[in-house]
Image (cartoon, grey):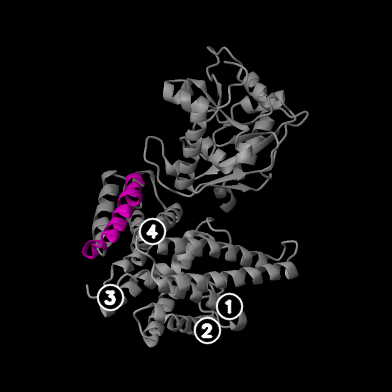
Amino acid sequence: MSGPQAKPSFAGRMVQAVVIVFARFITATRGRWEGVAPIDEQRIYFANHVSHGDFVLIWTALPRRLRSRTRPVAGSDYWLKGSLRRFIGRDVFNAVLIDRNRDTRADDPIVQMSDALDAGESLIVFPEGTRNTTEAPLLAFKSGLYHLATARRSVALVPVWIDNLNRVMPKGEFVPIPLICTVTFGAALHLGETEAKQEFLTRAEAALLALSPKANTL
Amino acid sequence: MTAPPPNLVIVLSGLLVILIVASGVGYGLQRKLSPDGTNAVIENLNDRIRAWWVMVVLMGLALIGGKTGVTLLFAFCSFAALREFITLINTRRADHWALAAAFFIVLPVQYYLIWIDWYGLYSIFIPVYAFLLMPIIAALRGDTDRFLVRIAEVQWALMICVFCVSHVPALLSLDIADYQGRNVLLIAFLVIVVQASDVLQYVWGKLLGRTKIAPRLSPSKTVEGLIGGALSAMAVGAGLSWITPFTPLQAALLSFVIVVMGFFGGLVMSAIKRDRGVKDWGHLIAGHGGFIDRLDSVIFSAPIFFHLVRYGWSAT
């Protein structure tokens, strides 16, 4: 399953519209563009990950013409399990599905993501690698973001902080509580010419964490 | 659906004329003082006028839609207000089911009771039944940390955002002699007096305001603004007596009560915002902050206005 995937089906697009209306109803999401403008420029959005709804929220905050060219990156171990998840992952969200298991995977995730970028699309990635269910605001980034930045140096890396969604639907609950969520887009980053891996990841973590409203009130 | 009462058409046309004039003035001011969009006061004024258009159009459609339209509109206002309120309070994981019940059971049931005119139940449903039910749901989850604070906050959210707001559509259930079929005009009266009072207090405050009433809470509120706003809102109320069952004097006195309750409502809601460390309740309406920022005066005046009219004029 390497290479660009097919465009979402008609049914997929209908479900997509319903999901976005529902997300607005529950969270009244609005994007706060603090570091970059909502313009049609190729980007890698990297965000904190607290809930399965995260990329729906980022999507909802994006203007429509950007949304159709922005694909989330998600784990195939989760999204290919069962036909409903497969439909949602592929047809509704048009996700780039990567295999997180290093030992069994057939495709290199960095190659899959680079292919999508080469096709002109923007990506949404969650560099923590998994949902953060701890009390800590942010988990340490996995190295994927660095490898992606190395593979496509020219693409802007935009930090995106999603706030409050963990209160809307805590892990293990299935009824969402309507609460206002915000999606804050920060200033773009680029990998420095001589920047080492850990140095870059620490800088990216700090840039994301700085967008959290809690960081601003302390 | 029956045809809207003729007076409603006149009132809505009047509001449209006022809005068209306001938009014209706003446009003129912008051309003259803020051609590049840099004068914050003018830009805010124009944002407000645009939001007024949306509010008047929605309100007009709801009033023309009669009881179902008005009930649905205010149920949605309650939903949006509750969403803003709950966002700012100290909820925990253990409150999840209590909050779900607030949004998806208490709110719809309250508006259903309003819609079927069951006064005996809707006037005590939240103060008694929700008051007892919510802490039970929260207690079942076993988390006792800050328990009293959490349940008190949820109860307050329901009283403010659902119970008080629902007294606006409840005006439709009053049975007033020689006024059948025109109750929507009571809502128009209440909303126009409240909003006129807000705007006129602002205008008088800008013109003459010197003595601050609560400088720490709400620096823009002044004694001069309040008196000027109250007197002119009473004049507006008296001038609208022809759409109500009241005499001009009664309409002026009811307007006075509405203005005073609305003023203190704004003050109380500002105190809550200060406590939570925010400037606005939300960001839904450009230039106006959140829903609660627009509704705060109505929230405090609606139940009092409802009961005064019910005891003074209604047969039921």
**Label annotation for residue B228:** 2
Please check whether the numbered discs 4 and 1 fall on a single chain. Answer: yes
Q: Dot 4 corresponds to which residue? A: B69
**Numbered disc 1: what chain?**
B
Judged left or right of residue A135, residue B138 is left
- Which mark's residue is nearer the viewer, 4 or 1? 4
Above or below for A184 versus B289:
above
Nearest to viewer (mark 3 / mark 1): 3
CA distance for labels 4 and 2: 34 Å
Give whichever of B262, A47 is nearer the camera. B262
Is A8 placed above or below A203 here?
A: above
Are the residues at dot 4 and dot 3 in contact (C-beta closer than 8 Å)?
no
State the residue position of label 1. Answer: B203
| Residue at (50% x, 49% y) in the render | A28
Same chain for mark 2 and mark 1? The answer is yes
Q: Where's residue A69, x and y in %? A: 63, 33
Q: Is residue A101 left or right of residue B66?
A: right
> What residue is disc 3 on?
B176
Badges 2 and 1: C-beta atoms under 8 Å apart?
A: yes
- Residue type at numbered disc 4: Gly
Which one is nearer the viewer's eye here, B209 or B46? B46
The earlier-in-sequence mark between 4 and 2 is: 4
Residue at the (27%, 80%) spot, across then down: B312
